[in-house]
Image: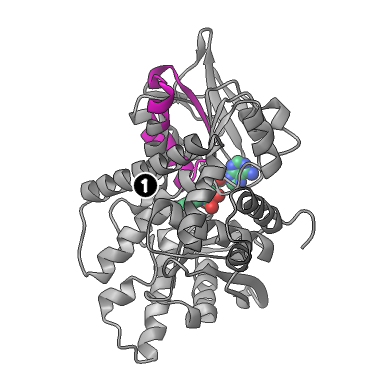
Amino acid sequence: MNNSSVYQKSKDEILKTGRKYNLPQDKLEEFLEPDRILEVKIPIKLGTEIVTFKGYRIQHSNKLGLYKGGLRFHPKVNKDEVMALSLWMSLKTAVVGVPFGGAKGGIAVDPKALSEKQLEELSRNYTRKIYDILGPEKDIPAPDVNTNPKIIDWMADEYIKIAKENKTDLPQNKLNAAFTGKGKNGLDGRVEATGFGGVTVLKELAKKLKLNPKNTTIAVMGFGNVGYYFADFASKEGFKVVAVSDSKGGIIKKESNGPLALDIPLVMECKLEKGSLAGCYCAGGVCDTRGGQMITNEELLILPVDILVPAALEDVINDNNMQNIKAKIIIEMANGPVTPKAYHHLTEKGAIIVPDILANSGGVAGSYIEWEQNMKDKKYKKEEVLKRLEKMMTDAFENVWNESVKNKTNLKEASYLVALRKILG
Ligand code: NAD
């Protein structure tokens, strides 16, 4: 592993926590290594040519239950990144208290460069390549960056096709449980679950810190599944979401007495119409292209807001910009958006950073409810799903908060402690 290995940095941090709290080193070291690394090549036809993509599925740990974790389609997907993401899944499932372990997968591909037909072929071929290690009682994938219910439906369909070719004795409802985040046979509330869970954590934190939502400004980086729903639920709870961004940049609408709260559903409508956020300054019920300001993602990160929510990719708050970050609260909705060094630097300066393994664990909690719904052959209502999620997230937050108070430490170390005590027994 080289110096820039995200997995190695994460392991080092966890080992340090283990030493500080006298956790059994041998058990910890054994846990940190993934159980299985599967690398596959996935050939698909692009025009007259056959092009081969590289795919991964890494099963990190099943100490607390079945392997569970998302699938990412992105040009930067690589073995080291997937190893780190799979380790974080093992910790996350433990923090939020679902009986799952951790796994992660992905394909190194720019899905935007493929036609829908090519994307479907890639998704189905990947499923065939990793079929043997999947299953509703083994390993259950879900969506992540650039994968959505449509892609998951292709994979679930392919999985079920192969299972039937192989004369499976699993009934249909259990076969449906092989993937979560599905459109067909999915869970009402799963698509919102990660953002909803993050806002539950935000509300609990606001109570502890006695923040008044209507005076609390928020900037959200990333306007996909996680960022959009986070921004939407936070606005509905009365927080002032003043800036949002996607991969092409962000928007803010400033007035003389400070930035305006954006109308998040309208911003989304505008993004869907235009294809990106550029020019979508939607506040007070209208979108216009005047009065607003385009900002880069780097500018969004250093805005003087109360709360910063990185909800896109990892390592965006790092050595290069940590000195300039002004927000006193950061909620890590993406996985690994703050590097360990930046986390240390900012918390030393008094910032409160809610770590990813707590903040975005609503996604896997929602996936657990979806899996359970399919396994029990039931259909849950969205209101009951969100209610259950709220309880799971509130309990997880309370556990981590109490651990941090007890040990006079930051929320990341406290989350590690909560997770590792369960995993190491
Ligand atoms: P997504 O593909 O739906 O959205 C990603 C968003 O990030 C898009 O708006 C994209 O434009 C934006 N983006 C991409 N590159 C960017 C850049 N360089 N700068 C700014 N914005 C950029 O993905 P998602 O499912 O919302 O996942 C976002 C993050 O949340 C990831 O780290 C993922 O691992 C994590 N996460 C997702 C879930 C889930 O349920 N989907 C659960 C837990 C954690």
Residue in view at x 41 percent, y 56 percent: 364
Name above or below for residue 255 compared with residue 338.
Answer: above
Residue ID for mark 1: 192
Q: Outermost residue, front direction?
A: 22
Q: Outermost residue, top direction?
A: 256
Examine the image and state in which quarter residue 305 appears: top right
Q: Position of residue 49 (x, y in %)?
A: 68, 77
Q: Position of residue 361 (x, y in %)?
A: 44, 50
Magenta region: which residues?
205-234
Image quarter in which the N terminus is found:
bottom right
Give yes or no for residue 79 being in the magenta stretch: no
Examine the image and state in which quarter residue 55 appears: bottom right
Answer few, some or many: residues within 10 Å of disc 1's Cα (few below 14, many 20 plus, some between 14 and 19).
many
Residue 265 showing in the rendered view: no
Name above or below for residue 380 compared with residue 326.
Answer: below
Q: Outermost residue, right direction?
A: 2
> Is residue 2 shown left or right of residue 270?
right
Name above or below for residue 90 compared with residue 269.
Answer: below
- Which residue is nearer to you in this view: 416 or 170? 416
Residue in view at x 46 percent, y 77 percent: 134
Q: Position of residue 237 (x, y in %)?
A: 34, 28
Main SS, magenta region, reads helix
Residue in view at x 54 percent, y 50 percent: 416
Residue in view at x 61 percent, y 44 percent: 337
SS label for mark 1: helix
Specify the amino acid type for callout 1. Answer: Glu
